[in-house]
Amino acid sequence: MKVALTAILFATLLLGCTQNSKSEKDELMVFCAASLTDVVTEITSSFANETGVEVRLNLASSGTLARQIEMGAMADLFISANQNWINYLEKEGKLASDTQIKIAGNELVLIAPKKSGLLPFHYSKNKDLSSMFKGRLSIGDPKHVPAGTYAVELLDKIGCLNELQKRFLPAKDVRSALIIVELGEVEAGIVYKTDALKSDKVKILTEFPDSLHNPIGYYMSVIKGADNNRSLQLYNYIVSEKMLPVWKKYGFKK
């Protein structure tokens, strides 16, 4: 009887430890769109300092990250640069229920290397971008980079897509598109305003109105099976009022 009782107590203790380890993680993995590198790094570092929970970031294009999660990559949170990839994973049954949320907005800008002879201008629908320069245009690869998708939408809307598409230099993510312009490998690029603002190697030529493309939004969700106390704690921390100044510091709209 004592042996049986001891076994039951041991099993109960083991179950309790297992459940606790599932709900209280010491490390979290966030799959995050590359254009959020600075702001999410600061927020997760602050979270780690306050909680003692290490947060690791996997930074890449939203499409690349979504495919990794689809294939079984271990993640706790997914932050996408558009809603399409969130919807994609939701249809695949990869996201925890009722955790999809928009967390920030952004704008697109046309940029050129700092030393470029191209001058800043106020955007108008009469401006023919394709005649402004003869070289290549750096954008995120529209096949899997939301910033590239938005860029294609706006160029199509203003009637420049057919001409400029032949001069695209697609990049693996929007950060890479910025770097290509910084290095002077192209004459111009279309990137997020937040990325352009933090670079001292490029200049903003013009800001594009939101009406030229679908609304730019960053969306976050908890991954199915990762809806434990720590993951939800970080999820709530990222969207908390306390973090609003951090988002604004990096130029994101809330």
Image (cartoon, grey):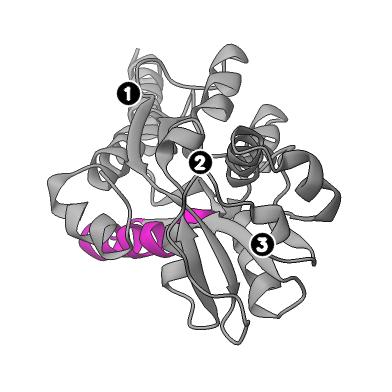
What element does badge 3 sit on?
A: helix
**Mark closer to the observer (2, 3):** 3
Count all numbered tags in the image, as a single digit. 3
Above or below 128: residue 2: above
Callouts 1 and 2 close, C-beta under 8 Å? no
Query: Which is the main secondary structure of the residues drawn in magenta?
Result: helix
Q: Position of residue 240 (x, y in %)?
A: 18, 44
Alpha-carbon distance for marks 1 and 2?
A: 49 Å
Sequence-first disc among 2 and 3 = 2
Q: Residue furthest bottom?
A: 115
Which quadrant of the view contains residue 160? top right
Above or below 161: residue 181: below
Whether residue 24 appears in this view of the structure is: no
Q: Amino acid at mark 1?
A: Leu
The 10 Å Cα crowd at callout 2, few under 14, some 14 to 19, many 20 or more, is many
What element does badge 1 sit on?
A: helix
Q: Amino acid at mark 3?
A: Ala
Sequence-first disc among 1 and 3 = 1
The 10 Å Cα crowd at callout 3, few under 14, some 14 to 19, many 20 or more, is many
Q: Position of residue 31 (x, y in %)?
A: 53, 45
Residue at numbered disc 1: 9
Alpha-carbon distance for marks 2 and 3?
A: 15 Å
Residue displayed at 40% across by 62% down: 41
Q: Which residues are magenta?
A: 35-53
Above or below 156: residue 187: below
Residue displayed at 41% across by 70% down: 197
Query: What mark, if any, has residue 81 been given in the picture?
Result: 2
Residue at numbered disc 3: 177
